[in-house]
Amino acid sequence: MDGPEFRQLRKLAGLTQEEAARVLLVSHRTILRWEHGASRIRPLKAYAIRAKLVRRMFGQGEGEA
């Protein structure tokens, strides 16, 4: 997953960068680095992020992993 794809998913899930950091259990700085391409999201982590953000888009709870 690249930065623009992550940003699009985050926005579709209705999350600010700060909220996404909280939901994904990473720092706000990590979100910034992902979105600006300064850091790559590893494939396994990208899969987990996609799953979590898609669940949020469809109204499933934040507490589900």
Image (tube, rainbow, N blue to C red):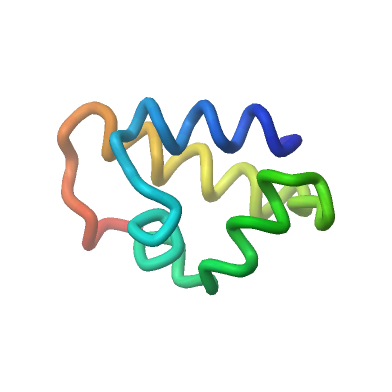
Q: Residue at x 16, y 34 (%)?
A: 59
Q: Indicate left or right for 55 with 49 as reference.
A: left
Picture coordinates of residue 45 (x, y %)? Answer: 65, 55
Give the vertical position of 21 relative to 20 (above or below). Answer: below
Q: In front: 19, or 43?
A: 19
Q: Residue 12 sits in which quadrant?
A: top left
Q: Quadrant of the N terminus?
A: top right
Tag count in the figure? 0
Q: Indicate left or right for 6 with 59 as reference.
A: right
Picture coordinates of residue 22 (x, y %)? Answer: 37, 67
Q: Residue at x 22, y 27 (%)?
A: 58
Q: Residue at x 54, y 73 (%)?
A: 27
Picture coordinates of residue 6 (x, y %)? Answer: 59, 37
Q: In front: 63, or 35?
A: 35
Give the vertical position of 5 relative to 28 (above or below). Answer: above
Q: Residue at x 40, y 40 (%)?
A: 53
